[in-house]
Amino acid sequence: MQLGPAYGDALASLAPNPSTSALADKTTEKLVQDFRYLQGQATGSSAKFMDYLTYSYMIDNVALLITGTLHERDTKELLGRCHPLGWFETMPVLCVATNIEELYNSVLIETPLAPFFKGHLSHQDLDELNIEIVRNTLYKNYLEAFHDFCNNDSEMATTCTGEIMSEILKFEADRRAINITLNSFGTELSKEQRRKLYPDFGHLYPEGMLMLSRADDLEGVSLAVSGNADYKRYFDEVGLSQGNNGVGNMSGGSGGENKSLEDLFYQKEMELSKLVFTQQFTHAVIYAWVKLREQVKQAAYCQQNDTNVVQEIRNITWIAECIAQNQKDRIGNYISVF
């Protein structure tokens, strides 16, 4: 009843008491339908821009198929787990591959991700490297290409898209560099390998990225990001600042004031996405619309703007789970905080 105006027909086929997973599937399906409709009407730079929005989902889907091939799983079964925004017409072709070399050759020939593989990764890399290194290498190449497109496309030169998307993509590049560094501690990933995974742009580039590549511990990461006021504040809030002997709160936020570093990063991403709608004649509104509709986290509070940010699909799913578990008080407490 409450979701009818926004999701109407998409939810009509659900049973009277649907599971939360079914609800999430239907709301995601609605988002994909709306996106594909817009994509079908797009031309020129707008069409290319929307293609770039799908590449990140394609990277995740291909990484899933690579993992399945490495573990000799039936890749056809994995197709059902792929994100629909990352689906492309020739994806089923990847399921024909019987080994990693065949899969690699199929990716280079049949998929839009070929530019991000060619000259950067070989089929031996897919065999020998950790899949997360492969994924992060592809994301690095993707972000650099997207940033270059937004700033150098001739049609976008007449809009403010380049300026807006540069801010968003620089933040994404910084976030990935910081997370890669924090997650590399205690692993076999060398500093040289780590540096190769950082995008070659961002607010921290180049000095901050260089310091991140040399960091040996949390204090080193804190020092590397201290030149950026937002990142320094985030590290202070979660107890990862210089001189703090604790491990801090990198991913364990549980609502209320107990926010993790990842929570604060999502909050920043939502702030940037909302600000896009204050501008006119920019392709970036499509990017912001997608991010605000399907963001992975439940919700984040924009302290600077004193306003709520709703990441719709996941938030709907979380509320439905609370109702299903007869924990409606959690919703009230959550809303009172946010």
Image: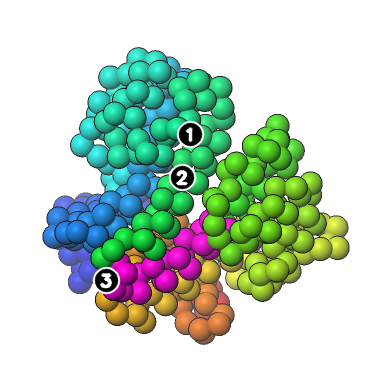
Q: Residue 270: horizontal and vertical position, in percent?
A: 46, 69
User: Is 185 in front, or is 154?
Assistant: 154
Tell me whether the residue at label 2 lies in contact with that at label 1, contact meaning CB atoms closer than 8 angstroms: yes
Q: Indicate yes or no whether the magenta region holds residue 149.
A: no
Q: Is residue 237 left or right of 2 when viewed as pictured? A: right
Q: In which quarter of the image is residue 157?
A: bottom left
Foreground mark, 3 or 1, reads: 1
Q: How far apart are marks 2 and 3 (CA)?
A: 42 Å
Q: Is residue 202 above or below residue 278?
A: above
Q: In which quarter of the image is residue 279?
A: bottom left
**Which residue is drawn at the image coordinates 46% and 40% (left, top)?**
138
Identity of the residue drawn at 66% across and 69% down: 228
Highlighted magenta segment, given as a residue range? 156-174
What residue is pinned by disc 3? 2
Residue carrying label 2: 141
What residue type is disc 1 on?
Answer: His
